[in-house]
């Protein structure tokens, strides 16, 4: 018997595992909310695209695209979560567009970016003066959002 794994379902790499191991050693506030990449999955539910999705189950910090069981939460929270995940999924990933998402969602404290993400790429966010790199390894960068923004 041959086992076939669809490449698009492999959402974590060795770079993600190193980033997650680093994240597990950090002291995260209970208010932490990590903006993570997303893509459509099925039945109108998004899924993660890289190791950022694993921040919730492995590190214990909230992410903007949580595991699909979030759809069983209260309707208002599901609607807000789905709207935010869709905003990331449908963005072009420019620094200005990601900043607009973060500005309209003040609870976001960090961004998990990888070059594999369709919209949250470190190369597109690296020059943003409103972000601080807190981790970088391989193609993964975790940014802290510096608030308030200096315009």
Image (tube, rainbow, N blue to C red):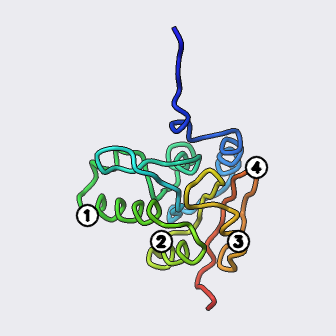
Dot 2, crowdedness within 10 Å: few (<14), some or many (≥20)? few
Query: What residue sits right under mark 4 in the picture?
Result: 138
Dot 4, crowdedness within 10 Å: few (<14), some or many (≥20)? few
* 20 or 112: nearer the viewer: 112
Mark 3, secondary structure of its residue:
strand
Mark identifier at residue 76:
1
Residue located 51% across and 36% down the image:
9
**Separation (CA) of disc 4 from disc 3:** 17 Å
Indicate which disc, 4 or 1, sits on the residue closer to the N terminus: 1
> Which mark lies nearer to you, 4 or 3?
4
Indicate which disc, 4 or 3, sits on the residue closer to the N terminus: 3
Mark identifier at residue 107:
2
Mark 2, secondary structure of its residue:
loop
Q: Is residue 98 above or below residue 64?
A: below
Residue located 56% across and 63% down the image:
29
Mark 1, secondary structure of its residue:
helix
Mark 4, secondary structure of its residue:
loop
Residue lying at the far right of the rendered structure: 137
Q: Is residue 22 above or below residue 35?
A: above
Q: Residue 34 location, x and y as percent?
A: 54, 61
Q: Residue 105 location, x and y as percent?
A: 45, 74
Indicate which disc, 2 or 3, sits on the residue closer to the N terminus: 2
**Separation (CA) of disc 2 from disc 3:** 16 Å
């Amino acid at each position: 018997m041959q086992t076939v794994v669809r490449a698009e379902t492999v959402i974590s790499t060795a770079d993600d595992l190193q980033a997650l191991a680093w994240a597990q050693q950090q002291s995260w506030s209970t208010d932490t909310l990590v903006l993570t990449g997303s893509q459509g999955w099925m039945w109108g539910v998004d899924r993660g695209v890289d190791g950022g999705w694993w921040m919730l189950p492995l590190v214990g910090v909230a992410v903007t695209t949580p595991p699909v069981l979030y759809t069983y939460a209260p309707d208002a929270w599901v609607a807000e979560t789905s709207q935010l995940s869709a905003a990331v999924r449908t963005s072009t990933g420019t620094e200005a567009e990601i900043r607009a998402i973060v500005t309209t969602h003040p609870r976001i404290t960090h961004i998990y970016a990888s070059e594999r993400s369709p919209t949250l790429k470190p190369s597109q966010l690296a020059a943003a003066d409103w972000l601080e790199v807190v981790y970088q390894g391989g193609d993964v960068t975790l940014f802290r959002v510096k608030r308030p923004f200096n315009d």
